[in-house]
Amino acid sequence: MNIIETISNLVIELISKFGYIAEFILMLLESMGIPIPSEVVMPFSGFLVNRGELAFWSVVFVGALANLTGSLIAYGIGYWGGRPLVENYGKYIFLKKHDLDLAHNWFEKYGKAMVFFSRMLPIVRTYISFPAGFAKMPLGEFSVYTFLGGLPWCYLTTIIGVKMSDKWERIKDYFHIIDIFIALAIIYIIVRWLYKKK
């Protein structure tokens, strides 16, 4: 059993036992840069919606609120501590310099809009809050973009869990592939938007 499978099984067990509380804490941790797979958290919560154990919109809003809360913590760390602090201590929460560089480059290239769009992109969505903090992006704008960007991601991944709950055992190992397809679709939308803007 590899580490991703181990973490995924732990996520499933926690949400099964503690419902919304576990969903909130796990999504908060992921948004702080800790490698908790939201590709498992949200669809499994959707699976429990299908079984009548959780409510659909409650799952979506809890996920988006947790994403905002964790992102605000990461933003604060970036704002007050700067990049040196994040790089020096990020290794203790498995934050890789390469992933931070990727998020930083996207933010530098596309600006504030990236805070919204990145919430649906692998890796970047987890770390974009740090460069937004480094750049001292206005807190109000950051909060609005983060919450509104997180809602579609939470909605889509919850829907996947609801619609495919009868195939849960077969699909749970393929959420990262679903993640990539969603990411490609979002990148296509961003590129078209930038092209039209120019």
Image (cartoon, helix red, strand yellow):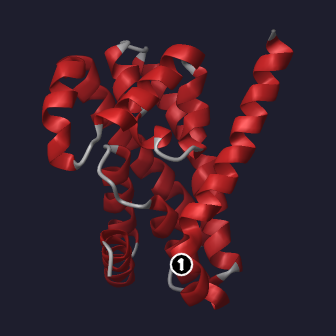
Q: Position of residue 102 (x, y in %)?
A: 45, 30
Horizontal relation, residue 37 to residue 180: left or right: left
Which residue is painted at 32% across and 17% down in the image? 134
Q: Nearer the viewer, residue 190 or 145?
A: 190
Q: Is residue 68 left or right of residue 187?
A: left
Residue most toward the top?
198
- The outermost residue toward the right is 196
Residue 58 appears in the figure: no
Name the image quarter holding residue 121: top right
Image quadrant for the C terminus? top right
Q: Residue 28's x, y, as percent?
A: 34, 51
Residue under the point 50% across and 73% down? 45
Q: Position of residue 21 (x, y in %)?
A: 33, 67
Mark 1 lies on residue: 172
Residue name at image x 65 percent, y 77 percent: 162
Residue type, mark 1 in image: Lys
From the top left corner, tell me how far across and down residue 137 is, in percent: 42, 15
Q: Within 10 Å of the Cα at label 1, are there few (<14), some (14-19), or many (20+) other Cα atoms?
A: some
**In the figure, 102 relative to 163: above or below?**
above
Tell me if residue 185 comes above or below residue 157 in the rendering: above
- Quadrant containing the N terminus in the rendered view: bottom left
Q: What residue lies at 65% left-to-right and 90% top-to-bottom? A: 166
In this image, 92 relative to 161: left or right?
Answer: left
* Residue 165, above or below 80: below
